[in-house]
């Protein structure tokens, strides 16, 4: 029973760290998206994709070092798994934006925030189970 409690505590701690890293990723994502969309006048989906990929890269590095403490020597393979799950997350992210902003005309940045929350659950689950194999 104690092992189960410790395991759950470690899972919650990792999820908390993942969310903190994700928070830094939100800053990167929104910042890059804003600059690409508003300053460079790129299409909102392209701007969103650029921001998301920049955030995914910084998130991988921080999660590898801090959240999961990975020492896997196959960094490129691990990064590609992480990026692959992030790209599925990007598709989910853009789908939410399309459905709620494109179809329903909800405010873009509020919808992007909601999409980010949905994708956080997907990314943590997949990376916990497969990328960092905890």
Image (tube, rainbow, N blue to C red):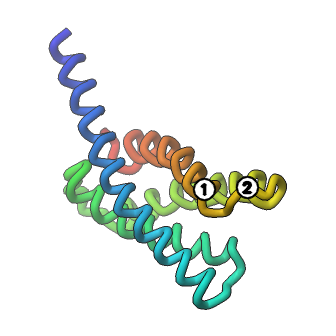
Nearer-the-camera pick, 86 or 25: 25
| Label 1 secondary element | helix
Give the class, few, some or many, for how many residues have Cα within 10 Å of label 1's Cα (few <14, many ≥20).
few
| Badge number at residue 85 | none
Q: Name the residue under label 1.
A: 110
Residue 29 position (above or below residue 94): below
| Badge number at residue 106 | 2
- Residue 41 is left or right of residue 4, and the answer is right
Image quarter of residue 12: top left
Tell me what residue is drawn at x 54 percent, y 49 percent.
Answer: 119
Residue that lies at the very extreme toward the right in this rendered image: 103
| Label 2 secondary element | loop
- Residue 20 is left or right of residue 81, and the answer is left
Gap in angstroms between the C-alphas marked 1 and 2: 8 Å
Residue 44 position (above or below residue 22): below
Residue 10 position (above or below residue 38): above
Q: Please state, as top left, top right, bottom left or bottom right, where the N terminus lies in the image.
A: top left
Residue that lies at the very extreme toward the front in this rendered image: 107
């Amino acid at each position: 029973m104690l092992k189960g409690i410790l395991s759950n505590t470690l899972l919650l701690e990792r999820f908390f760290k993942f969310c903190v890293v994700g928070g830094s990723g939100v800053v990167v994502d929104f910042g890059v998206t804003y600059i690409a969309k508003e300053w460079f006048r790129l299409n909102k989906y392209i701007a969103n994709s650029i921001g998301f990929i920049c955030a995914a890269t910084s998130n991988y590095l921080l999660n590898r070092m801090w959240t999961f403490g990975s020492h896997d020597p196959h960094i490129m393979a691990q990064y590609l798994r992480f990026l692959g799950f992030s790209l599925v997350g990007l598709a989910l992210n853009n789908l939410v934006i399309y459905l709620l902003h494109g179809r329903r005309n909800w405010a873009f940045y509020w919808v992007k925030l909601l999409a980010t929350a949905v994708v956080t659950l997907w990314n943590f689950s997949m990376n916990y189970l497969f990328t960092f194999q905890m």
